[in-house]
C-alpha cells in the first residue's frame, strides 16, 4: 500500500522535508489481525535494521491481560515479526539505551513492579533498573526519554490501577528525572492529570509531555477500536 505523502503528513519544519525527500511514500510493512500488536515504543536499531514495538493491552484466550513485545526484522522482504520472550511486565514506551539495549517502561502487574527495565537486544533478557520513588512503588510507568547528560525522564500515570492490573497507587500522577550515575531521582512535574508521552526539543531545553486526562481509556473495544491509553 502506498499513497501520496502530503495526504498523511504535514511538514512544519523544512529540516524534516530534507530527511524524507521530495516524493516519499507510505507502505504497509506488517500487520497482526489477532491483537493490536503495534501500539507503543517503536525503538529502531539501524545496525540490525530491526524495530521493537509493544502491543496495546488485550485479553488473551486464557482470559489474561497481556501486552506483547515484537521484534520487526526490516531486512526481510516481506518483513518478519517475532514475539519476544522477556520479563518486562506489561511493556509500554521505550527508547534506545546504548548500542544493544532497549530501555522499556514496564507498567507492572499485581505481583510484578512497575519501572524502567533494560532489555538486551541479543538475548532479550531484561533487568529492573528503577522501580520506586524513595521506597514507594511506581504506578504504571508509561513513557521515557534519555537526555544527553545521561539522565532519564519518564511519566508515571495511574492507568494500570484504573484498568485493573495494578494495585492502588502510592504516588500521584507525576513526571520524574532519574540520574543512574548518582542515583538521584526527583519529581519534576506533579500538575498533570495523566502524564503520558514525553520527548525533548532538538536542543533539549524544553521537554514536551502529553496529558491524556480528558479521556480515560479502560481497555474496552468500541466499534472495533481498542480504548486504552
Image: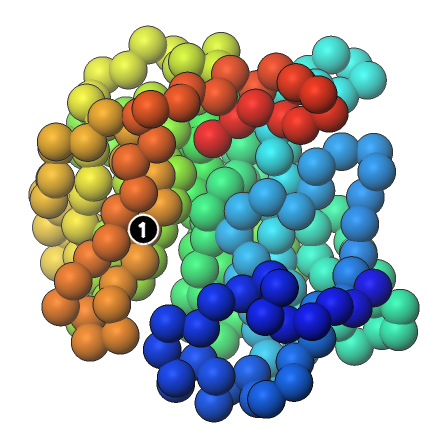
* Number of disc labels: 1
Q: In this rendering, is residue 45 above or below 71?
A: below
Q: Residue 57, can we see it? A: yes
The way the protein has been coloured in the rendering is rainbow
- For residue 206, which quarter of the picture? bottom left
- Residue shown at 83%/33% (left/top)? 34
- Residue shown at 63%/26% (left/top)? 226
Q: Nearer the viewer, residue 164 or 97?
A: 164
- Residue shown at 57%/40% (left/top)? 87
Q: Nearer the viewer, residue 59 or 20?
A: 20
Q: Is residue 203 left or right of residue 86?
A: left
Q: Is residue 141 left or right of residue 192?
A: right
Location of residue 38 in the rendering, given as x and y in whole percent from the top left corner: 66, 47
- Residue shown at 44%/80% (left/top)? 16
Location of residue 151 in the rendering, given as x and y in whole percent from the top left corner: 21, 61
Q: In this rendering, is residue 32 above or below 17?
A: above
Location of residue 67 in the rendering, given as x and y in whole percent from the top left corner: 63, 33
- For residue 64, which quarter of the picture? top right
Q: Is residue 112 left or right of residue 7?
A: left
Q: Residue furthest right?
A: 78
Q: Residue 29, can we see it? A: no
Q: Secondary structure at mark 1?
A: strand
Q: In this rendering, is residue 109 above or below 63?
A: below
- For residue 79, which quarter of the picture? bottom right
- Residues packed near mark 1 inside 10 Å, few (<14), some (14 to 19) or many (20 plus): some
Q: Is residue 108 left or right of residue 23?
A: left
Quarter of the image with the N terminus in it? bottom right
Location of residue 59 in the rendering, given as x and y in whole percent from the top left corner: 70, 19
Q: Which residue is mark 1?
A: 198
Amino acid at each position: 500500500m502506498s499513497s501520496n505523502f502530503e495526504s498523511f503528513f504535514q511538514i512544519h519544519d523544512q529540516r524534516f522535508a530534507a530527511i524524507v525527500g521530495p516524493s516519499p511514500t507510505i507502505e504497509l510493512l506488517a500487520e497482526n489481525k489477532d491483537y493490536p500488536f503495534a501500539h507503543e515504543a517503536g525503538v529502531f536499531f539501524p545496525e540490525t535494521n530491526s524495530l521493537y514495538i509493544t502491543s496495546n493491552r488485550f485479553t488473551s484466550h486464557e482470559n489474561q491481560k497481556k501486552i506483547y513485545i515484537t521484534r520487526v526484522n526490516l531486512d526481510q522482504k516481506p518483513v518478519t515479526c517475532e514475539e519476544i520472550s522477556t520479563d518486562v511486565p506489561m511493556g509500554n514506551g521505550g527508547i534506545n539505551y546504548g548500542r544493544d539495549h532497549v530501555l522499556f517502561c514496564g507498567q507492572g502487574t499485581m505481583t510484578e513492579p512497575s519501572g524502567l527495565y533494560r532489555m538486551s537486544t541479543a538475548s532479550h533478557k531484561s533487568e529492573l533498573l528503577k522501580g520506586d520513588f524513595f521506597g514507594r512503588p511506581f504506578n504504571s510507568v508509561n513513557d521515557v526519554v534519555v537526555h544527553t547528560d545521561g539522565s532519564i525522564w519518564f511519566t508515571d500515570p495511574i492507568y494500570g490501577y484504573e484498568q485493573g492490573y495494578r494495585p492502588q497507587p502510592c504516588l500521584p500522577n507525576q513526571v520524574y528525572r532519574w540520574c543512574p550515575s548518582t542515583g538521584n531521582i526527583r519529581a519534576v512535574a506533579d500538575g498533570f492529570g495523566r502524564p503520558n508521552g514525553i520527548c525533548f526539543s532538538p536542543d533539549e531545553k524544553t521537554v514536551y509531555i502529553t496529558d491524556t486526562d480528558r479521556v480515560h481509556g479502560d481497555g474496552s473495544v468500541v466499534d472495533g477500536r481498542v480504548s486504552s491509553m
